[in-house]
C-alpha cells in the first residue's frame, strides 16, 4: 500500500504516542500490584431461578420409622445318615472333575482344610448346623408405637425367623402376625424395644399423577436409602392378582426396596413398593406400589384377625367388549359379564345366572371385572348387598348375602361323567364359519372345525369348544343358533352373544350376524 510522505509522518507519530500510552498504563498496573492493591475481578455467575423443593425435612422425620427386614429359614441338611456328603449333587454324572467343581463352588473343602478360602467366600455349611439361614431381605415400616410394622408377603413367605434393623442400627427380633398373598402384604410385630416412631397412611384418592413422592428402603441390602420421583400413573394392572390397582412411580426402586414405603411431602405413606418393571433386573424408573387405601384395610384385618376375610359372590366373570356390549344392547362396555355361577355360590342362590352383566354393587358403578372383585372383596362375609345386572335388555337388582371367599379360588365343579353316545353327524354354521356336532350328553354343540378366515377364528374359538347358549337361550342344535341370529337381526343388533365352554370353563364371545 502506498502512503504519501506527509501521511506517513503523521501515522508514525500516532503509533509512537499509542505505544507510549501502553507503556505508561503497564507501569501504573505494576505499581498497583506492588503496592498491595487488589485487582478488580468480574463477578461469579449466579442464576436467580425457582429452587427444587428439598426432601430433607420429610426424610429426617420419616426415616426412623423405616426398617430393614431380614428373613431366615431352617434348611434341611443334605445328608443326615452319616454317608459321604455330596453337597446335594448326588444325581450328578459320575465325573470326578465335575463333582469337584461343584463341591469347591459350594465351599465344601477337603478334610485338610485346603479349601478354607472357598468356605469363607461361598458359605460352607456344617451338616450338623440346623440354625436358620438367610433367605430374603427387604424393607418395612412401623405403623404403630407398640411395634407393628408392614412389609411384603413375598419378603417373609419362606421365613421362620425375622429380624428388623432400625435406622440407628438396632437389631430386633420380630414375629409374623399375618399375611395376605392376594395383595402381597404382611404384618410383623416387634416386642420390646420401647416406643417406636411410626407413620400414617395417606388418603391416596387425593394422589395425582405428577405429585412428588419419596421412597425409603433397603435396596440391595445397603441400608437406609432415599430416592425421589413423581407418581407416573394410577390404577395399573400388572397381572399380579385379582385386586391389582397399583400406583406407578418413577422413583428408583430396586431389589430390597420391597415392602418399603413411598411418602408424600407430608410424610404420609401413599403406597408400598412391591414390584418393578425391569428388563435388566435393576431400576429403569417404573415401579409399582400397593395403594395406601388397600394396604390400610388389609393391614387392619391382619392386625385384628391374623388373616383377611373377604366377601364372595361365587361367579366367574369376564370383560365386556364392545362387540359383547352391542350384542346385549348395552350403551357402554362397562361392567363384568358372568360366564358362570357356581352351584354353591351366593350369587346363584340369589338368582344371578350366566349371561348377566353386573353393572353396580350397592349403587357403585362396576367398570370392569377387576373393579367388581375389589368391590366384593371389600365387604365382610355375610354382608347383604344389592347387585344390579343387565338381563334380557333391561336392568334388574338382586339382593345377595355374600359368602366367605374360599381358600382356593377354584372350586370343584362336581360334574358327573356322562355315558358316551354314538358320534353325531357334523353340521355346518356357514354364516359363522363353524362346523359343529351335537355333544355326547345332548347339551350344546361341539365345534369340530373353524374357518381360519372367519370372525370365530379371530375371536379365539377352537375345535373342541362347546356352544352351550346363544343370547342366553340354550343350544341343542343348529336350528337354535339360526333362530337366535334371526332374532338378533330383527332387533337391529349386529352380533349374537355365544356362550362357550372349554376345559370346564365358560366364556362369552360376540360373533357378527350374517349381512343381508
Image (cartoon, helix red, strand yellow):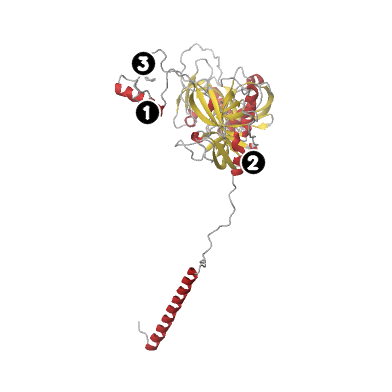
Q: Tell me, yes or no, if residue 333 can be seen here.
A: no
Q: Which residue is mark 1?
A: 117
Q: Earlier in the sequence, mark 1 or mark 2?
A: 1
Q: Is residue 179 above or below residue 250?
A: above
Label 2 secondary element: loop
Label 3 secondary element: loop
Q: Which residue is mark 2?
A: 266
Q: Residues within 10 Å of mark 1 (few under 14, many from 20)?
A: some
Q: Which residue is mark 3?
A: 84
Location of the N terminus by quadrant is bottom left
Please state which of residues 47 and 425 is positioned toward the viewer in this rendering: 47
Q: Residues within 10 Å of mark 2 (few under 14, many from 20)?
A: few
Please state which of residues 434 and 201 is positioned toward the viewer in this rendering: 201
- Nearer mark to the viewer, of 3 and 1: 1
Q: Are marks 1 and 2 in contact (CB under 8 Å)?
A: no
**Which quarter of the figure has residue 15?**
bottom left
Q: x, y (%) of residue 28? A: 48, 74
Q: Earlier in the sequence, mark 2 or mark 3?
A: 3
Q: CA distance from mark 3 to mark 1?
A: 22 Å
Q: Residues within 10 Å of mark 3 (few under 14, many from 20)?
A: few
Q: x, y (%) of residue 485? A: 56, 28
Q: CA distance from mark 1 to mark 2?
A: 50 Å
**Which quarter of the figure has residue 5?**
bottom left
Q: Indicate left or right for 31 with 52 as reference.
A: left
User: Image point 58% across, 20% down: which residue?
Assistant: 407
Amino acid at each position: 500500500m502506498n502512503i504519501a510522505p506527509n501521511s506517513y509522518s503523521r501515522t508514525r507519530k500516532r503509533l509512537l504516542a499509542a505505544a507510549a500510552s501502553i507503556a505508561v498504563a503497564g507501569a501504573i498496573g505494576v505499581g498497583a500490584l506492588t503496592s498491595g492493591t487488589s485487582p478488580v475481578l468480574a463477578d461469579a455467575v449466579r442464576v436467580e431461578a425457582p429452587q427444587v423443593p428439598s426432601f430433607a425435612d420429610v426424610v429426617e422425620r420419616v426415616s426412623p420409622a423405616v426398617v430393614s427386614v431380614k428373613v431366615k429359614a431352617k434348611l434341611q441338611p443334605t445328608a443326615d445318615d452319616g454317608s459321604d456328603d455330596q453337597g446335594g449333587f448326588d444325581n450328578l454324572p459320575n465325573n470326578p472333575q465335575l463333582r469337584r467343581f461343584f463341591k469347591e463352588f459350594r465351599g465344601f473343602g477337603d478334610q485338610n482344610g485346603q479349601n478354607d478360602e472357598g468356605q469363607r467366600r461361598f458359605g460352607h455349611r456344617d451338616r450338623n448346623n440346623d440354625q436358620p439361614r438367610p433367605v430374603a431381605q427387604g424393607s418395612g415400616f412401623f405403623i404403630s408405637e407398640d411395634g407393628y410394622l408392614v412389609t411384603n408377603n413375598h419378603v417373609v413367605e419362606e421365613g421362620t425367623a425375622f429380624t428388623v434393623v432400625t435406622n440407628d442400627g438396632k437389631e430386633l427380633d420380630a414375629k409374623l402376625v399375618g399375611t395376605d398373598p392376594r395383595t402381597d402384604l404382611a404384618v410383623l410385630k416387634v416386642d420390646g424395644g420401647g416406643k417406636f416412631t411410626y407413620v400414617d397412611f395417606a388418603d391416596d384418592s387425593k394422589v395425582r399423577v405428577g405429585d412428588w413422592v419419596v421412597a425409603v428402603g433397603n435396596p440391595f441390602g445397603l441400608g437406609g436409602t432415599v430416592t425421589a420421583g413423581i407418581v407416573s400413573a394410577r390404577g395399573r394392572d400388572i397381572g399380579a392378582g385379582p385386586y391389582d390397582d397399583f400406583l406407578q412411580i418413577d422413583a428408583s426402586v430396586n431389589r430390597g426396596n420391597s415392602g418399603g414405603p413411598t411418602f408424600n411431602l407430608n410424610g404420609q405413606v401413599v403406597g408400598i413398593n412391591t414390584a418393578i418393571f425391569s428388563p435388566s433386573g435393576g431400576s429403569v424408573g417404573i415401579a409399582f406400589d400397593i395403594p395406601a387405601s388397600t394396604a390400610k384395610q388389609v393391614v387392619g384385618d391382619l392386625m385384628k384377625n391374623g388373616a383377611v376375610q373377604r366377601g364372595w359372590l361365587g361367579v366367574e366373570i369376564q370383560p365386556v367388549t364392545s362387540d359383547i356390549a352391542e350384542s346385549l344392547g348395552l350403551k357402554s362396555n362397562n361392567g363384568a359379564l358372568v360366564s358362570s355361577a357356581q352351584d354353591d355360590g351366593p350369587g346363584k342362590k340369589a338368582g344371578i345366572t350366566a349371561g348377566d352383566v353386573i353393572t353396580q354393587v350397592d349403587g357403585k358403578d362396576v367398570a370392569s371385572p377387576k373393579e367388581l372383585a375389589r368391590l366384593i372383596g371389600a365387604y365382610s362375609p355375610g354382608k347383604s348387598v344389592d347387585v344390579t345386572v343387565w338381563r334380557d335388555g333391561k336392568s334388574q337388582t338382586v339382593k345377595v348375602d355374600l359368602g366367605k371367599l374360599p381358600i382356593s379360588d377354584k372350586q370343584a365343579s362336581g360334574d358327573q361323567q356322562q355315558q358316551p353316545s354314538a358320534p353325531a353327524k357334523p353340521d355346518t354354521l356357514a354364516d359363522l364359519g363353524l362346523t359343529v356336532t351335537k355333544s355326547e350328553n345332548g347339551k350344546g354343540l361341539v365345534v369340530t372345525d373353524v374357518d381360519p378366515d372367519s370372525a370365530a377364528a379371530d375371536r379365539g374359538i377352537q375345535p373342541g369348544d362347546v356352544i352351550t347358549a346363544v343370547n342366553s337361550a340354550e343350544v341343542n342344535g343348529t336350528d337354535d343358533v339360526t333362530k337366535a341370529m334371526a332374532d338378533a337381526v330383527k332387533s337391529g343388533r349386529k352380533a349374537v352373544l355365544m356362550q362357550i365352554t372349554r376345559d370346564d370353563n365358560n366364556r362369552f364371545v360376540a360373533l357378527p350376524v350374517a349381512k343381508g
